[in-house]
Structures are given as C-alpha cells and as structure tokens.
Amino acid sequence: MLALIQTVLLALDIYWWIIILSAVFSWLYAFNVVNSRNEVVGMIGNFLFRATEPALRPIRRVLPDLGGLDISPIILLLLLFFVRQLIVTTIAPALLA
C-alpha cells in the first residue's frame, strides 16, 4: 500500500511541475520570447496545453473575468497541494496503521 501512495504522490508532484512549466511557457509565448514557428516549440506547447487544459478549463469557467490575468494555474496548484497534504496527513496514516 505504501508503494501505491508514493506513486500517487509522485504523479501529483510531476503534474505540479507540468502546470508550472505550462504557465511559464505561456508567458514566453505571449511575450514572443520563443519562436512559435519552431516545430519543437510547437510540440512542447501542444503537450503542455493538452496536459493542463482539461484540469484548468473547469476552474476558468468558475472564476470571474479578471481581464488578462489568468489565476487558474494558481488555483489548481492550491488544489493539488491540498490533495497531497490530505493524502500525507490523513489517508496514508489511516491506511498504514
């Protein structure tokens, strides 16, 4: 059971970093720092978009319009932090006791 908990925590940690990379990439793309016509840049952007958009879209629907500011990645990171802490402090001790 410990291996399953550690695997879930690792998956949450990896997704945490994918969300951060997606936010940074969107800034680099918006400020024209990366070449949008480069095939590798396009593949990276497409992967990050496909990996994060299904989780970010419901959050964006609920949040009010803040102009050009998108705080949905921050909300998702807070939710992931909550789930991780719930697993570490509540679920794991109950299952391993």
Image (tube, rainbow, N blue to C red):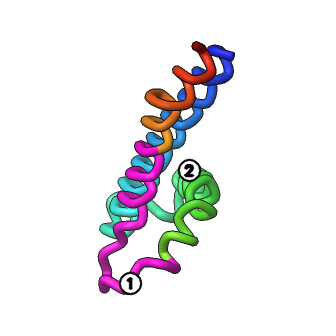
Q: Which residues are magenta?
A: 61-82
Q: CA distance from mark 1 to mark 2?
A: 29 Å
Marked residue nearer the N-terminal end (1 or 2): 2
Q: Split into 4 quadrants, where in the image is the N terminus?
A: top right
- Tell whether position 77 is magenta: yes
Callout 1, which amino acid?
Answer: Pro
Can residue 20 be seen from the camera position used here? yes
Q: What is the quadrant of residue 4 in the picture?
A: top right
- Packing grade of label 1 (10 A; few <14, some 14-19, many >=20) is few
- Tell whether position 8 is magenta: no
Q: Judging from the image, what secondary structure is the residue with disc 2 in?
A: helix
> Quick check: marks 1 and 2 in contact, CB under 8 Å?
no
Which of the numbered marks, if any, corresponds to residue 64?
1
Residue 10: horizontal and vertical position, in percent? Answer: 55, 27
Residue 2: horizontal and vertical position, in percent? Answer: 63, 15
Foreground residue, 88 or 70? 88
